[in-house]
Amino acid sequence: MRFSNILHLGIKELRSLIRDPIMLVLIVYVFTAGVYSAATAMPETLNKAPIAIVDEDHSHLSNRIVSAFYLPYFIPPVLISRSEMDAGMDTGLYTFALDIPPDFQRDVLAGRRPTIQLNVDATRMSQAFTGSRYIQTIVSGEVNAFLQGHRAAAASPVDLELRVRFNPSLKKSWFGAVMEVINNVTMLAIVLTGAALIREREHGTIEHLLVMPVTPFEIMMSKVWTMALVVLSATALSLVFVVQGLLSVPIEGSLMLFLAGTALHLFATTSMGIFLGTIARSMPQFGLLLMLVLLPLQMLSGSITPRESMPDLVQFLMLGAPNTHFVMLAQAILYRGAGLEVVWPQFAALAAIGAILFSLSLGRFRKALGSMA
């Protein structure tokens, strides 16, 4: 009877979710347009930055520098005069303005180390900092290549060969798409379960459950498995049709192994959503609690910033969060094609954390129901 109660209560939860258009729109959006926009519009990526060049030298070297800026990082450079540079920067036509001085090539060949002026519109911060480094690298590379054609290059004792693994083209969309799916799994798992509990309290249906022959465990378990099933199905569809299909991001490992790890992660995060739902008395309170919990989990789990760059204390504390282990197993499976023999410690950690969170949430849920009886 206990399994039958959990099944029928879960079906009731699915019917309630289907009748909630806002939640349905949220689920569809975060796993489709949300993933696509996060992968293709990452703010740290330099994309089609406008640049103008004042070429006062008109030499072979200056022409090489001008032709080195091209899509997708820069819009083809606009050649302007020196008098037009300040006006163009003031009106926001150019983010970068490069001024190549007269006799630049002659001074370079003579070893005089001439100076090139780079003007940057720093109000466009995301492009300003990244683009300045790009331009410095491009100009230095063109000057060095030009000098090698006129002088005998000294033999280097070391020949460095770069081999980029797992993302050979260095496309940030490959990283952004998968990480957005991972972050959305956590967010929706907490939101859906917490909102389901608060919705029943606001509608008064929780009192109806209290007079039925069901236990708090059955009520809570029905919410956990239904919301986990919804998020798990949306995750699988998003990986197949959006990540692999629309964005053409290769998945190296087993999708079924990743979904198994996702199920364990959902067991932990849906329990967390129930816990937050018992604390909050309304949806606005739940939203505030969600901000306090969700943002640190996502920022410190390694999905945005590598864990190795964080303080040792933060790394140690975040081992108690399910997100940390989920990000580790997701990156290992989806990026590097790891098998169960590699990620089993993360599976074990998620199972242990999920059991602890479920027990804590069940105790809190029983206490909350007892206060209503």
Image (spheres, rainbow, N blue to C red):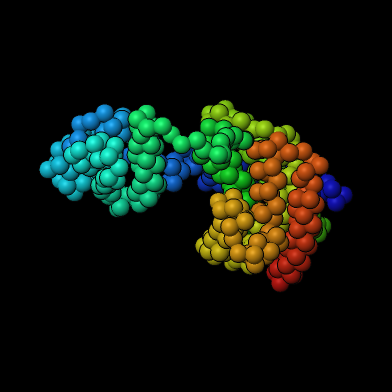
28 sits to left or right of 143: right
- Residue at image position (70%, 39%) is 333
| Coordinates of residue 213 in the picture (x, y in percent) | 82, 57
Q: Position of residue 243 (x, y in %)?
A: 57, 33
Q: Which residue of the protein is positioned furthest toward the bottom in this rendering?
A: 371
- Residue drawn at point x = 87 percent, y = 49 percent: 1
Q: Is residue 299 above or below residue 47?
A: below
Image vertical order of residue 244 relative to residue 13, above or below:
above
Q: Can you tell which quarter of the image residue 85 is in? A: top left
Q: How many marks?
A: 0
Position of residue 50 measured from the top left corner of the image (x, y, whole percent): 29, 38
Percent x, y of residue 94? 25, 42
Q: Quadrant of the C terminus?
A: bottom right
- Name the quadrant containing residue 197: bottom right
> Residue at horizontal 43%, vertical 34%?
153
Identify which residue, 122 or 329, lies in the foreground. 122
The answer to whether 183 appears left or right of 224 in the picture is: left
| Residue 48 appears in the figure | no
Question: In the visual, does 117 lie left or right of 283?
Answer: left
Which residue is more in the foreground, 73 or 254?
73
Residue 331 makes an appearance in the image: yes
As drawn, the residue found furthest toward the left would be: 83
| Residue visible at 56% across and 39% down in the picture | 158
Nearest the viewer among 188 and 262 is 262
